[in-house]
Image (tube, grey):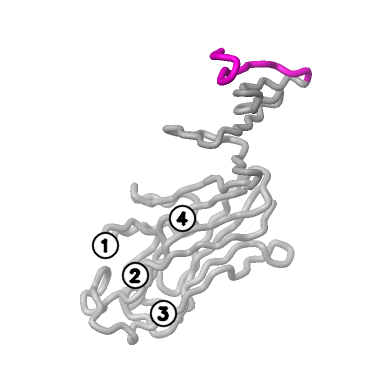
Amino acid sequence: MGTATDGYKLCVSEGSVFTISRQDAPLLMITNDSMVQIAAPELLVESLDVTRGLLVQGVPQWRMLSEESFADGTAEGWDANAVTHCAGTSMLGGYGEFAQKEVSKVFSGLPPHSHLRIKATFHFIDDWVGESGYMKANIGSEGGMTFVWTERHTQAETVNGVNLCGDVTASEGKFAVPVDVVLPHNQPTVALAFGSTITQNNPLHHSWGVSAIEIYVR
């Protein structure tokens, strides 16, 4: 294919490795166990669907396994499944629903992996007075739930705030706080929980929700 100086070669080695090369430099190799290795200096694709993991220069890349936006108003698998919509965001819980509460879900069927990445957005709504929102995962002793993320909020520290959700007399100083946690993990299931340290169960006075929950492995 092409000239002797710039042509491409196709061959199958004794190990059943199919190779496309240019000037004797391999560009693409497919092994007999369906592994694909691309050695081109640049790769442009419209879409890429990977089922067994992707490595870039030998480094495993994150693979999304689960994404929950709650946009359709449902929260499948959570032990409390109220969904509300506020400030253009659909969330599990929210104003009038979650205050002194913890919600959890077990995610199963995780493929072989060594690390877990959990992303979400935690929403502090209305009059918080120093309490914390948190996330837990069952990575503690003997699979116990343990804190892996916390964030504290005091509404009194907000000056000239904007009301985004809930009580129109209270502004939101930390309406959308990103959660992004990486954990060593190799089990086929993981349990996650979100909650708060609020002691008064009045979700019309102060409440919380969580949105855009994503789980990745590598």
At 32% from the left and 68% from the top, the residue drawn is 95
Q: Residues within 10 Å of mark 1 (few under 14, many from 20)?
A: few
Q: CA distance from mark 2 to mark 4?
A: 16 Å
* Element marked by disc 2: loop
* Element marked by disc 1: loop
Q: CA distance from mark 2 to mark 3?
A: 10 Å
Check disc 4 and report the residue beneath it.
213
Mark 2 or mark 1, earlier in chain: 1
Q: CA distance from mark 3 to mark 4?
A: 21 Å
* 26 magenta-colored: no
Tell me the number on the disc at residue 153: 3
Q: Quadrant of the N terminus?
A: top right
Q: Residue furthest bottom?
A: 156
Residue 77 percent coordinates (x, y): 50, 51
Check disc 2 and report the residue beneath it.
175
Disc 1 + disc 4, Cβ < 8 Å: no
Magenta-drawn segment: 1-14
Residue 165 position (above or below residue 16): below
The amino acid on which the numbered mark 2 sits, given as a three-letter code, is Phe
Disc 2 + disc 1, Cβ < 8 Å: yes
The answer to which image quadrant residue 38 occupies is top right
Front residue (pair 57, 131)? 57
At 35% from the left and 65% from the top, the residue drawn is 94
Front residue (pair 116, 44)? 44
Mark 1 or mark 4, earlier in chain: 1
At 55% from the left and 62% from the top, the residue drawn is 181
Q: Residues within 10 Å of mark 3 (few under 14, many from 20)?
A: some
Disc 3 + disc 4, Cβ < 8 Å: no
Check disc 1 and report the residue beneath it.
87
* 9 magenta-colored: yes
The amino acid on which the numbered mark 1 sits, given as a three-letter code, is Ala
